Image (cartoon, rainbow, N blue to C red):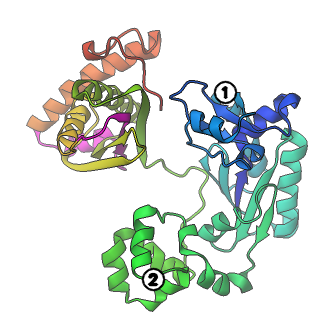
Amino acid sequence: MILHVDMDAFFASVEQRDNPQLKGKPVVVGGNSKRSVVAAASYEAREYGVRSAMPIFMAKQKCSNLCIVPGDMRKYSYESKKIMDIFMAYSPFVEQTSVDEAYIDITGCKRLFGDHTKIIMGIKNKILTERSLTCSIGAAPLRFLAKIASDINKPDGIFIIEKIMVKDFVKNIDIEKIPGVGKKAFEQMKILNIKKLGDIKKFNSSLILKKFGKFGTRLIEYANCIDTTPIGQNAKRKSISSESTLSEDTNEIEIIKKYLLSHSNAVGKDLRKKKKLTNIVSIKLKFSDFSQVTRQKVVNTPISSTQSIYRETLALLEKIKIKKKIRLVGVNVALLDKEIGHFQMELQNEVHEKIEKWEKVDKAIDSISEKFGNSIIKNAALKHQTNPRR
């Protein structure tokens, strides 16, 4: 049995707990400028139609008595760690997927803590008594079903899918509720008249794979009640990203390039700290109307230097026709399993020397920044720009 625990309106709930005057009121966590967005919304605010990622100005229009609280990530991270410690007391197999969500594999824990209903209630009671917060828990024999189940009775709810229920439940799940089904996939499914997960089985596997690629394999497995994804305490991070909302919408290419350089530096620094390389670089641009576009490139030689990543982002930028002003710029890189040293042994000497040259420069900068702060040394092109939000 696998549990998926989702804290209820986590950031906003922490603020309501710490400030009794906010209890029962519509609260959002976020900035108060015209460019700010909602980081989290209390359930009272959600009743007005306020949602996460909504611009603050729009949230104010929906709810005139909205309480806006600045976020405190240090406090939320502290709370998150305390909650994860509670999970670890019940099982060694805990996989934290975000600051307020985690999977717990409680298979074999019955002798210690009782059946899964007792474990679920034990976890909920501990979070309530020790942290004064509520959570919603889904339980199922399959990981993806646990995730879906945790959303059914929110907030402060429980939903358990017993083994005997799995086949019928899987057959009748609305397809848009499946983790990983985005807008594009959903539109394609509407064309194929796929409304429920069970509808996947009506089609030949080759067609599903052709239409949905790698995700098609997962859909076929889910429809056949298969999910072998393990729950691991130390699940590997597969990518690194850095993005920020611009202080003002712009279509000035040189300004966009500066942001790309800043984010290339941020993800490159993180790569080097982890002693990792990447061979997939992508950029994200969000426009003034909140539509967005992403572009991705596979590079022949694995890289980690800021200049190499930046060069690839510029090549991707050239492929995008910018017809509207841009409000957000982001860079993402995929992590390769091998560390830098492994690749250096495999690369040809000439290529190795070029990579090593840039690595030495970057490592020197990283070391200085580590000692004296990020603002002490900066690329000349970024001297008037603040560090990107991650």
Q: Answer whether residue 105 is visible to the viewer in this image.
A: yes
User: What residue is shown with label 2?
Assistant: 193
Q: Check disc 2 and give the amino acid type.
A: Asn
Q: CA distance from mark 2 to mark 1?
A: 45 Å
- The numbered mark at residue 196 is none
In front of the other: 209 or 327: 327
The quadrant in which residue 364 appears is top left
The quadrant in which residue 253 appears is top left
Mark 2 or 1 closer to N-term? 1
Q: Residue at x 32, y 84 (%)?
A: 206
Q: Residue at x 23, y 24 (%)?
A: 254
Image-based side of 194 in relation to 172, left or right: left
Image-based side of 45 in relation to 22, left or right: left
User: Which label sits in the foreground, 2 or 1?
Assistant: 2
- Badge 1, how many Cα within 10 Å: few under 14, some, many 20+? few
**Residue 208 magenta:** no
Q: Is residue 170 above or below residue 288?
A: below
Q: Is residue 70 above or below residue 92?
A: above
Q: Residue at x 59, y 56 (%)?
A: 232
Q: Position of residue 126 (x, y in %)?
A: 87, 48
- The numbered mark at residue 72 is 1
In front of the other: 75 or 371: 75
Residues drawn in magenta: 322-349
Q: Residue at x 46, y 80 (%)?
A: 220
What is the residue that sits farthest to the left in this orientation?
Answer: 350
Q: Check disc 1 and give the amino acid type.
A: Asp
Q: Answer whether residue 2 is visible to the viewer in this image.
A: no
**Residue 346 magenta:** yes
Image-based side of 300 in relation to 54, left or right: left
Look at the numbered disc 2 and give the secondary structure of its residue.
loop
